Image (tube, grey):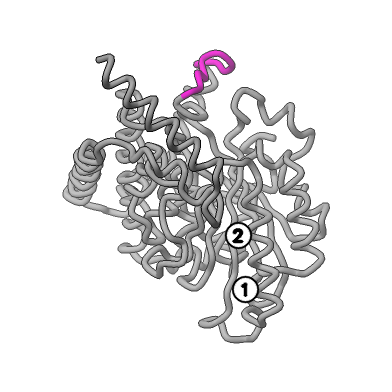
Amino acid sequence: MTPDDPALVRVLAADGRLTPTPAAEPYLAAVEALTDAELEQFYRDMVVIRAFDQQATNLQRQGQLALWPPSLGQEAAQVGSAHAARPQDHVFPAYREHVVCRIRGVDPMDIIRLMRGMTHGGWDPYDPKNGNTHLYTLVLGSQTLHATGLAMGLVFDGKCGTGDPGRDEAVIVYYGDGASSQGDVHEAMVFAASYQTPEVFFLQNNQWAISVPVSTQARAPLYHRGEGYGMPSLQVDGNDVLASWAVTRQALDETRAGGGPRAIEAVTYRMGAHTTSDDPTKYRTSEEEAAWAGRDPIARMRAYLEGRGASGGFFQEVDAEAQAVAEDTRERTNALGDIPRDTVFDHVYADAHALVAEQQRWLAAYEASLEEGA
């Protein structure tokens, strides 16, 4: 269960050198075809989302958000896989795929609004501007069932395997090593395999299910679980954005064309807390964190781009954009105002319900009593 397993697909070493593993050989042609603009966009997306993520963490610490799930350290797995998807594909995130959502067109402030408690879902998944990005799912693993259900519908409706790559659709669903132990994930894989859905199960193994290490959760690499259901499965260095992109691109192309589901385990590391309610110092060592910091996906990609001749001006421009996004996030969050009290009662039932109305009246009276006593 180490990032050095023989089956691991890696293109870039931790120091940014192009040193592919044997398992990466089939993907090198695609990587070599990437343009400078595409490579620089990968780096830009990672840097900008890290600035956004760190700003959101600070906002939660200052009482502006109820909760925040940091994505620090997992940027390469997310950026690479998100860019591998086609516009017609459907994306099912878990709850820390912030940059996946941004790449697909979701306004990151919609994530802020969700974590502030101002909305039940965050954004409209059916709005074309959101790029077929479905809602965050805080119930671990349940998004894999949602994804498989939609993927089954694509099979029934003849929207995959037609031979037309521009029209065929696929689904990619994100989940973590902790969620991989949930029954929902295994049920989803059963149905995906049975119906040969056009679906990629993208597991981000960040080494910790809150405080439980992956070594406790599994006695074999997690990608083998997909193999157990009869789907082609592989392991990729999740801190290598090029490998993440290449592997996911091929898996989506194959499943979209009618090849059935695929499973990818992206080996990465959660450099921050599980959420802002968690204290990772209680269960992991500073030595472990330092070792993984040496595999930082952003530093790795920067070293690679510098070796290709990227200018200092480019990196300054990206840093300035990241700072601007972070400042804009702070300003827009502070301008959101109070959480609308009545939204907690909206959409509990499809029709008006006497109990909900009673609870709404009670809360209004309670808040009024506090104002009278002030």
Provide residue 52's location: percent of width, then percent of height. 31, 40
Residue 253 covered by magenta stretch? no
| Whether residue 290 is visible | yes
Task: Please name the residue shown 64% across and 85% down the image.
Answer: 162
Provide residue 365's location: percent of width, then percent of height. 38, 28
Q: Mark on residue 313?
A: none
Nearer to us of marks 1 and 2 is 1
Q: Which residue is mark 1?
A: 256
Closer to us: 114 or 363? 363
Closer to us: 70 or 24? 70
Left or right: where does residue 84 sit relative to residue 212?
left
Q: How many marks?
A: 2
Left or right: where does residue 56 sit relative to residue 14?
left
Q: Mark on residue 25?
A: 2
Task: Please name the residue shown 42% across and 31% down the image.
Answer: 363
Residue 280 covered by magenta stretch? yes
Residue range (magenta)? 277-286
Report if the CB atoms under discs 1 and 2 are less than 8 Å apart.
no
Q: In terms of sequence position, does the residue under pointer 1 or pointer 2 come before the other?
A: 2
User: Secondary structure beneath disc 1?
Assistant: helix
Magenta highlight: main SS: loop
187 in relation to 117, above or below: below
200 in relation to 218, above or below: below
Task: Please name the residue shown 65% across and 55% down the image.
Answer: 201
Could you tell me which quadrant the C terminus lies in?
A: top left
